[in-house]
Image (tube, helix red, strand yellow):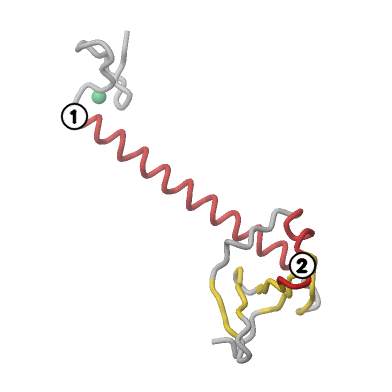
Amino acid sequence: MAKCLECGEVLTGRMGQKFCSEYCKSSYHYQKNKQKESSTYVRIDKQLKLNRSILKKYNSSGQSQIKKELLEKEGFDFRYYTHSWSAKNGNEYHFCYEYGFRNLADNGKFMLIMWQDYMK
Ligand SMILES: [Zn+2]
């Protein structure tokens, strides 16, 4: 016997019916959308925190250069960052919280820096 996907009530209607009412149908889809939204949020939040912990691990001195492959091997995803900052010379840094990075495309390395008070 088929049951309503939302409230579990036994369905007496036509074959293939999934919900007992329009109310249950829209409530079900609303909940599902909300879940999807929150799982996207959780995934991005997790990636940002992972990025931060990787940057922290490789930037204990406050400023260093690190091979791009090494960061990627750790699971670093440089598409995710919390904000950006441009230096006076035009170099743009991306930050995951207080840890920043810049892609030095020419030598396959990343420049790692720490957020400073003057970077506003
Ligand atoms: Zn129902």
Q: Which amino acid does label 2 sit on?
A: Gly
Q: Name the residue under label 1.
A: 22
Q: In this view, does 3 lie above or below 23?
A: above
Q: In this view, does 62 lie above or below 78?
A: below
Task: Give the camera-side residue of 4 and 77.
Answer: 77
Q: Of the residues tagged 2 and 1, which is closer to the observer?
A: 2
Cα distance between the residues tagged 2 and 1: 56 Å
Image point (41%, 48%), residue name: 37
| SS for dot 2 | loop
Mark 2: few/some/many CA within 10 Å (<14, 14-19, 20+): few
Q: Mark 2 points at which residue?
A: 108
Mark 1: few/some/many CA within 10 Å (<14, 14-19, 20+): few
Residue 66 occupies quadrant = bottom right
Residue 53 occupies quadrant = bottom right
Image point (20%, 32%), residue name: 23
Residue 110 occupies quadrant = bottom right
- On the image, the x and y values in percent for residue 104 come to 72, 74
Does mark 1's beta carbon lie closer than 8 Å to ligand 1? no
Q: What residue type is labelled 1?
A: Glu
Image point (77%, 65%), residue name: 57
Sequence-wise, which precedes: disc 2 or disc 1? 1
Quarter in which the C terminus is drawn: bottom right
Image point (29%, 25%), residue name: 7
* Rendering quadrant holding ligand 1: top left
